[in-house]
Amino acid sequence: MIKIERQVTDPLGFHIQLAVLLAGEAQRWRSRVTFRHGQSAVDAADLMALLSLGVPSGSSIEICVEGPDEATAAEAIRDLARTF
């Protein structure tokens, strides 16, 4: 399992445009991608679940990637997460 930790720096928090990008990227891979904020964890491929977390700017998040193509998937998601 590969963990990616980030702080959301976008002034709008983790908003719909970021959620669409992450969900789309998570759906590309065979590995399971999990998005964690606080005590909650959701499937990153599920757009509505991502939005339901209501992650504000300045919050810490963790993205976990686990599966057969986790190294490649994590690198792609790490690049995307830099925009958060």
Image (spheres, rainbow, N blue to C red):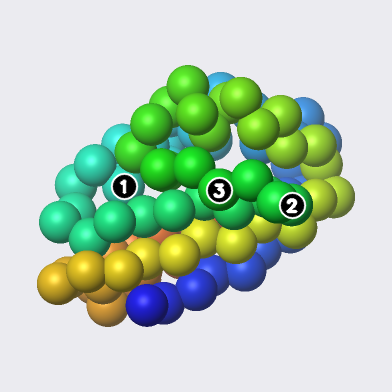
Residue occupying the point 22% across, 60% down: 31
Q: Which numbered disc covers residue 38?
A: 2
Give the Cα separation between the discs numbered 1 and 3: 14 Å
Q: Can residue 26 be seen in this view?
A: yes
Q: How crowded is mark 1: few (under 14 residues within 10 Å), some or many (20 or more)?
A: many
- Where's residue 68, x and y in %? 14, 72
Describe residue 9's horizontal placement relative to residue 82 as left or right: right
Q: In this view, does 68 lie above or below 61?
A: below
- Looking at the rendered structure, the secondary structure element under dot 2 is loop
Mark 3, secondary structure of its residue: strand
**Residue 65 falls in which quadrant of the image?**
bottom left
Label 3 belongs to which residue? 41
Q: In which quarter of the image is the N terminus?
A: bottom left
**Residue ID for mark 1:** 26
Three-letter amino acid code at disc 3? Ala
- Dot 2 alpha-carbon crowd within 10 angstroms: few under 14, some 14 to 19, many 20 or more: few
- The alpha-carbon separation of the residues under discs 1 and 2 comes to 20 Å
Q: Looking at the picture, which amino acid does disc 2 mark?
A: Gly
Point 38% across, 31% down: residue: 46
* Nearest to N terminus: mark 1 or mark 3: 1
Q: Is residue 84 left or right of residue 21?
A: right
Kind of residue indicated by mark 1? Ala
Labels 1, 3: front one: 3
Q: Residue 69 placed where, x, y %?
A: 17, 70
Front residue of 12 and 50: 50
Q: Is residue 83 something one can see in this rendering?
A: no
* Circle 3 crowding by C-alpha within 10 Å: few under 14, some 14–19, many from 20: some
